[in-house]
Image (tube, helix red, strand yellow):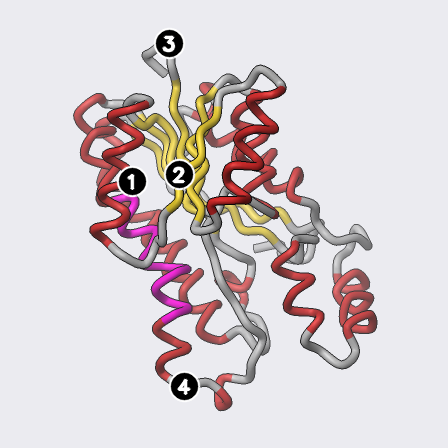
Amino acid sequence: MGTDKRVAIVTGGGQGIGRGISEALAEDGFHVAIVDRDEATASEVAKALQDRGLAASPHRVDVTGSARVAAVVDEITTTVGPIHVLVNNAGFDEHLLFVDTEETFWDRIIDVNFKAALRFVRQVLPGMLERKAGRIINIGSDAGRVGSSMEAVYSGAKGGIIAFTKTIARESARAGVTANTVCPGPTRTPAMESVLEKQEKAEATMQAMVRAVPMRRLGEPADIAAAVRFFASDGAGFITGQTLSVSGGLTMA
């Protein structure tokens, strides 16, 4: 993509899907800037990659503040180099009926799952447009494509990510910058386990999710990372504004 050192930012890169993406991009030769609010997990992943001879650095930030996001992007650009790939993966959710939620909950869901991506794109995109090269990969959700019970606000935020990504793709295409969305289905992550722990019939819920997937298994972080890896690759340079579900056939839309 034009320079010897290719730099990728992965938000929420310290665990779950984000960790899988960080590992995949590092294996593909990117210096991966692992951005996470949990400094310990970001550092752990970065060290594990460095021990394998791969390039990575941890960067602690709370994605809900524009000034903090601007500062971490400036830090990465200054210490590592210009950003070639941005993966907006940071997310948060709780399973609640909409009528049981309050506006403070809505604000948190929208801030982390939607506005955080806006903040990072706003900071990174100008440089990509100037260099006429770059890849923006936003992690959506099948909940944003078809809805999901007990995830009303999360579904809305992820639907917003899909529409936002398409618009960025349109606005950036002439500069050679692509923007695509990867939508995971049910995926085995620490976040999912945390949600299930709060339910009385966690095992039954897990089995119900597995039965709903035509391939009869949950996704793994590596499954999602494979799609991100493709969109970040040189071979995907003519693909933009697309939404790809990685869900074992659960969603076919």
Q: Is mark 1 on a helix, strand or loop?
A: helix
Sequence-wise, which precedes: disc 1 or disc 4?
1
Q: Which amino acid does label 3 sit on?
A: Asp
Asked if disc 3 and disc 4 are in contact, CB closer than 8 Å, the reply is no
Asked if disc 1 and disc 4 are in contact, CB closer than 8 Å, the reply is no
Q: What residue type is labelled 2?
A: His
| Residue 203: quarter of image | bottom right
**Residue 102 image label:** 4
Q: Which amino acid does label 4 sit on?
A: Glu
Give the residue drawn at x 37%, y 31%.
135
Camera-near label (2 vs 3) is 2
* Residue 232 lies in the magenta-colored region: no
* Most frequent secondary structure within the magenta stretch: helix
Residue 216 % position (x, y) = 82, 54
Asked if disc 2 and disc 1 are in contact, CB closer than 8 Å, the reply is yes
Magenta residues, as a range?
108-121
Question: In the displayed structure, would residue 211 be above or below residue 23?
Answer: below
- Reading the image, the residue beneath label 1 is 72
